[in-house]
Image: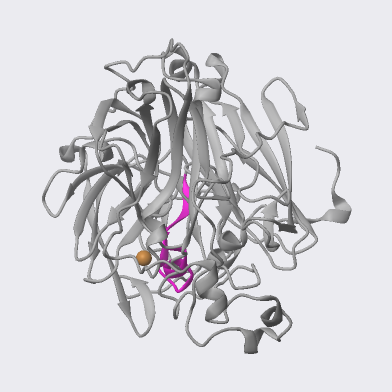
């Protein structure tokens, strides 16, 4: 059902009087709807692209301050957020990747913590060395900073977000997340839509209290399912498009909610990429399912629609989500408002993804994702930084078998460092659009899945966890160690801001 603002006032949820009450008295016993926003009225926008503070022959240097801010997300309401540079999503970093001989560059990103809790920054999808991977216990205390080094070794759609031990949910939900895009010469040589026609879509669901503040109710550490769908921080935005092709880089950066993207016209999304880059060839799908942390690339061809057409990006509800408001079945809209020529095209071949032969695997490991004792566990264990649960040899190919023992929960499984390929799910081949390099795998209810990879290019300890960030915090996270003798994740500690020199 839908709750209008008038209904809400009648029920006493909104109104000037209620805002004067102490919060505990103001808040109804049961979780309520967020203040209402009419869909498709707020203008679409994309986060700003961050400029380096300095560049040299090999490296671009960036600086980001983590700080609190008050922003207007719901029209007429002020919301406290924690943001990279005080905005959420934070600024997008775009970087030229690939080998240095092909113009690939390294990034150094300085993260300065002016918040009152310790943070850790994970660049999700980057093969960073262990001290720069955002290890959960490698914290930047308040008043400290840390310079992270990123090699940008492969072109893909990545994202950076908080990863502080036990606090990932609240920190990401406060707003500490954004996208990081690595391009390279090969991808630039393809005739895909570029520039203003290549658009990031960071999808998040949030829940707000009657005073506009964020509601952190995760229902006993099971998950947070918001009733406001945000794209790039804007509730149900309206994007004006020309009648041509657009390339979208989409990321599900919510807390727990899986989404299913679908066009209201019933037309296809033309899939071109997975988490870790382009796929071998475009494939069409009517519905794109995305767990938290997954990224996909797709083209929408608006040329078939007359000017004046509205195309809604819908989200038919998945049964595992917890919804009390059908507004989450819509995400944003595209209004075709102008005629334009289109010099882009979709090549038949993109970037060849060479399958890793099963026969090259030297061993198989099984990880069971389960709930017991009120905790989320992997092989019946919770996070312990002093325990390593798998030690693949450097360069070894292994098959990892993921088992979801629960019938009511999905777990998007994220493996740090490596890109992997899915072999099968419940014995069946992966969905056509999943057949590429990935670092998050949608492990559905009671499902079993096999993934394969070669462990490298770095040695050392890296995390694997459920990316329902409520599950991750309590405590569905483990670590593996590639080879021997890698850098200790805690070997480059943060430093006090008072010792900070210019980059
Ligand atoms: Cu989970």
Residue 413: x, y in percent?
35, 56
Q: Is residue 406 magenta?
A: no
Quadrant of the rendered structure where residue 456 is? top left
Q: Residue 166 or 80: which is nearer the viewer?
A: 80
Q: Residue furthest left?
A: 427
Residue at screen point 48% across, 79% down = 31
**Quadrant into which the N terminus falls:** bottom left
Residue 303 relative to residue 128: left or right: left
Q: Residue 49 or 19: which is nearer the viewer?
A: 19
Residue 46 relative to residue 372: left or right: right
Residue 443: x, y in percent?
27, 57
Quadrant of the rendered structure where residue 266 is? top left
Residue 63 relative to residue 130: left or right: right
Residue 424: x, y in percent?
17, 47
Observer able to see residue 482: no
Ligand 1 lies in which image quarter? bottom left
Q: Residue 495 or 388: which is nearer the viewer?
A: 495
Residue at screen point 34% across, 51% down = 315
Identify the colour scheme used. Answer: one colour
Observer able to see residue 121: yes
Give the vertical position of 168 relative to 499 (above or below): below
**Quadrant into which the C terminus falls:** top right
Residue 335: x, y in percent?
46, 33
Number of numbered markers: 0
Q: What stretch is highlighted in magenta?
A: 459-479
Give the vertical position of 307 relative to 345 (above or below): below
Quadrant of the rendered structure where residue 195 is? top right
Residue at screen point 14% across, 55% down = 426
Residue at screen point 76% across, 64% down = 142
Give the vertical position of 330 relative to 188 (above or below): below
């Amino acid at each position: 059902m839908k709750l209008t603002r008038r209904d809400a006032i009648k029920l006493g949820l909104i109104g000037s009087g209620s805002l004067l009450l102490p919060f505990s008295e103001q808040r109804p016993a049961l979780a309520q709807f967020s203040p209402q926003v009419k869909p498709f009225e707020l203008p679409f926008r994309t986060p700003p692209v961050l400029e380096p503070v300095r560049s040299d022959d090999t490296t671009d240097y960036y600086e980001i301050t983590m700080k609190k801010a008050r922003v207007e997300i719901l029209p007429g309401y002020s919301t406290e957020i924690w943001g990279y540079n005080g905005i959420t999503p934070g600024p997008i970093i775009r970087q030229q990747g690939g080998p240095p001989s092909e113009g690939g560059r390294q990034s150094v990103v300085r993260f300065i913590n002016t918040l009152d809790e310790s943070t850790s920054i994970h660049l999700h999808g980057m093969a960073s060395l262990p001290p720069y991977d955002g290890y959960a216990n490698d914290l930047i205390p308040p008043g400290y900073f840390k310079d992270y080094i990123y090699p940008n070794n492969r072109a893909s759609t990545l994202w950076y977000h908080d990863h502080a031990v036990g606090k990932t949910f609240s920190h990401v939900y406060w707003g500490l997340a954004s996208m990081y895009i690595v391009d390279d010469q090969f991808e630039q040589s393809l005739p895909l839509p570029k520039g203003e026609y290549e658009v990031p879509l960071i999808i998040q669901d949030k829940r707000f209290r009657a005073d506009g503040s964020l509601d952190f109710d995760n229902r006993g550490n099971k998950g947070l399912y918001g009733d406001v769908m945000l794209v790039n921080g804007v509730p149900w935005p309206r994007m004006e498009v020309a009648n041509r092709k657009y390339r979208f880089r989409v990321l599900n950066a919510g807390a727990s909610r899986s989404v299913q993207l679908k066009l209201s016209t019933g037309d296809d999304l033309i899939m071109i990429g997975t988490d870790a880059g382009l796929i071998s060839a475009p494939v069409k799908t009517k519905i794109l399912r995305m767990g938290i942390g997954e990224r996909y690339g797709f083209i929408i061809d608006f040329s078939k629609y007359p000017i004046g057409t509205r195309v809604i990006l819908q989200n038919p509800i998945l049964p595992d989500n917890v919804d009390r408001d059908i507004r989450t079945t819509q995400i944003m809209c595209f209004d075709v408002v102008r005629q334009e020529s289109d010099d882009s095209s979709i090549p038949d071949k993109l970037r060849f993804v060479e399958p890793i032969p099963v026969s090259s695997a030297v061993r198989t490991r099984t990880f069971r994702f389960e709930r017991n004792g009120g905790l989320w566990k992997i092989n019946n264990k919770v996070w312990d930084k002093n325990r390593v649960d798998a030690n693949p040899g450097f360069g070894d190919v292994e098959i990892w078998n993921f088992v979801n023992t629960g019938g009511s929960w999905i777990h998007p499984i994220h493996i740090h460092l490596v890109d992997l390929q899915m072999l099968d799910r419940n014995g069946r081949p992966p969905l056509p659009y999943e057949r590429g390099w990935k670092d998050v795998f949608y492990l559905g209810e009671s499902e079993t899945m096999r993934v394969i990879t070669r462990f490298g290019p770095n040695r050392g300890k890296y995390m694997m966890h459920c990316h329902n960030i409520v599950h991750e915090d309590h405590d569905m996270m483990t670590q593996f160690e590639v080879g021997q003798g890698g850098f200790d994740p805690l070997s480059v500690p943060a430093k006090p801001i008072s010792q900070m020199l210019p980059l």
